[in-house]
Amino acid sequence: MPELPEVETIKRGISDLTGQTIQQTIVRNPKLRYKISPTLNQELIGKKILKISRRAKYLILELSHGFLIIHLGMSGSLKLINHQINPDSNDNTPSAPIQKHDHVDICFNSAILRYNDPRRFGMIMYVDTLENCTLLTHLGPEPLDDKFSANYLIKRLINRKSTIKQLVMDNQIVVGVGNIYACEALFLAKIAPTRSGSNITKTEAALLVNTIKQVLTNAIMLGGSSLRDYKHADGNLGYFQNVHNVYAKTGQQCKVCNTVIKEQRLGQRNSFYCPSCQT
Ligand SMILES: [Zn+2]
């Protein structure tokens, strides 16, 4: 599943589209998580991209009027394909052949932004304004923003009986802390994932805020290093897998203390932790 660092990497990877004007939108299959509006092409055509930003795992393309919101769902990916319109030819078919699950093309003068999604849980939606956009209201702060601080987190944990693991993965508390990052940040903060939120101390909250920022910053940095490959459109972001301490390491020895890493199901997600380092 594309996580926040991948979406951030994609955002940076498509930043060259800023200032470009949408020439055409081709929808081959509208049946994503929310059906793509049949008027999408009319809504986008002729509009210039003013700014590309990210909120949680939503990519937000600010247009000369309105906004295009893209979410990659479980299995979505975006490719930026070089595509030079030949003024001497009427054939503007993109040079890259269309693959299975290439559902949408957003065409510019010199590039195509192509959306592929085998499981079709993603979304592409045009909105006039972001105010009152129900997708974005109720989202907690960005994890790398100063608003996500120890003071903020400890306030949000008061009287919360859920496990700290589930609470840091709750988008209303903080966005974008996926399962991998929650496991890794809790390991670095030496906090057991099963602890109840209300029982986390202020010192621990401060440490956890720092390790969440550290793990995500690291993943974005590693994701960023594969940008060039991404631009070459192979769609693979080989990031972060090699630097896990506990995630998917069940049965292996903890790098710190050699205790065997354990796995436990919490809120339908597998949690990986060191029973000795994390208390
Ligand atoms: Zn350990």
Image: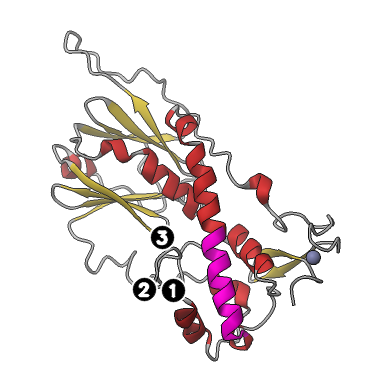
Residue 154 sits above or below residue 53 on the image: below
Crowdedness near tag 1: few (<14), some (14–19) or many (≥20) residues, C-alpha within 10 Å: some
**Ligand 1 has an atom within 8 Å of the beta carbon of the residue at disc 1:** no
Residue occupying image coordinates x 58% and y 66%: 211
Whole-Å distance between the Cαs marked 1 and 3?
11 Å
Find disc 2 in the rendering and name its residue. 138
Find disc 1 in the rendering and name its residue. 172
Q: Position of residue 90 (x, y in %)?
A: 19, 12
Image quadrant in which the C terminus is located = bottom right
Numbered range of the magenta stretch: 200-214
Colouring of the image? secondary structure
- Considering the numbered disc 2 on the image, is that residue within a helix, a strand or a loop? loop
Find disc 3 in the rendering and name its residue. 56
Task: Identify the disc placed on residue 101.
Answer: none
Predominant secondary structure, magenta span = helix
Q: Amino acid at mark 1?
A: Gln
Residue contact at pointers 1 and 2, CB within 8 angstroms:
yes
Residue occupying image coordinates x 42% and y 56%: 57
